[in-house]
Amino acid sequence: MENILEINGLCKKYEGFSLKDISFSLPKGYIMGFVGENGSGKTTTIRSILNMAKLDSGSISVFGLDSVTDTVAIKQRLGVVFDSLYMGEHLNAKQVERQLKPFYENWDSDYFAKMLKDFGLPDNKPVGDFSKGMKMKIMIAAALAHHPELIILDEPTSGLDPVARDELLDILGEFIEDENRGVLFSTHITADVERIADYVTILHNGKVWFTGTKDDLTEMYAILKGDPDDIPAGISEKLIGYHKYRNGFDALIPGTELKNIPDSLEHEKATIDEILVYIAKEDKKHERDT
């Protein structure tokens, strides 16, 4: 499969935080959920893709072009939606278009007007007076108006009500029907990822903890529960986020270890949200141990 986005060995250091050897790729025709706890490095990675943050080392390729030397050409073919309104709040939709249109060779005014109509957005009202959902919709309309091949969204569903979130996910599903396009969808709402993503990349403490298909991720881990005394020898050190309580324990366990688990212990498939929780528990355990 041809990749629409490739990141290889990305490193970026700030005071108190750094990205360490970030590598993953997104094939054409797919949606990737980009997840991790707050501060894991998702936004820094996205800023690096957009050439808004200078790389310390590594490389990023978008459409086969270099993110630094070919940044202008890339942005002609890229749509971006952030978690907060980046447009002048005093502007109405028509004025927003007049500001953005000169920057894009393929800006389609008819398509932009159609999206405003489809989204039920007024074209004569200041965007600063829009609801959270309406602000997200006009940013999506602006991101799609030049017919991009890749959309990058940074926490777009944050603060949206369930109806607005559902509408956004439907829009992304329709966008990806053209198999030459791609979506990188950063969010902390993992239910959205489980609904629409084909691939998942998990960042943790500035590193890639997992990257691959969503199905592979959910098959790789399970939640184990039961009596701690029933845990076989050699398994304890493989448990992630082990938590003992009065009536038993729970922990995340690699799926490859389930064959070594006795029937007295229960296990169930882990959701992406649960995987993130157990990763965080493991960190806290190490902090206490040290």
Image (tube, rainbow, N blue to C red):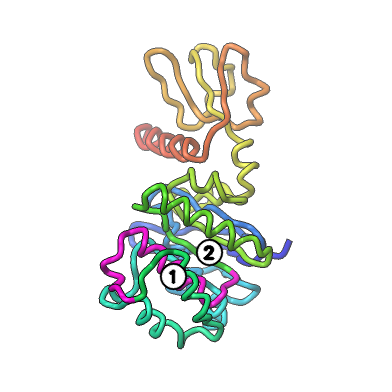
Residue type (three-letter) at the residue carrying disc 1:
Leu
> Which residue is at 63% across, 49% downward?
212
Query: CA separation, marks 1 and 2?
Result: 38 Å
Image quarter hosting the C terminus: top left
Q: Where is residue 68 drawn, in percent x and y?
A: 53, 78
Please say if 194 is above or below 7: above
> Which residue is at 44% across, 47% downward?
189
Residue 172 picture quarter: bottom right
Image quarter hosting the N terminus: bottom right
Element assignment for label 1: helix
The first of marks 1 and 2 along the sequence is: 2
Q: Is residue 269 visible?
A: yes
Label tally:
2
Please say if 226 is above or below 101: above
Q: Where is residue 220 drawn, in percent x and y?
A: 62, 36
Instruction: Tell me the chief SS of the magenta region.
Output: helix
Residue range of the region highlighted in magenta in the rendering = 124-149
Q: Where is residue 273 drawn, in percent x and y?
A: 47, 39
- Label 1, residues with CA under 10 Å away: few <14, some 14-19, many ≥20: many
Residue 76 vs residue 180: left or right? Answer: left
Between 258 and 99, the one lying in front of the other is 99
Please say if 29 is above or below 166: below
Residue 19 vs residue 259: left or right? Answer: left
Between 125 and 285, the one lying in front of the other is 125
Residue bearing the label numbered 1: 116
Q: Nearer the viewer, mark 1 or mark 2?
A: 1
Magenta span contains residue 44: no
- Label 2, residues with CA under 10 Å away: few <14, some 14-19, many ≥20: many
Residue bearing the label numbered 2: 10
Residue type (three-letter) at the residue carrying disc 2:
Leu
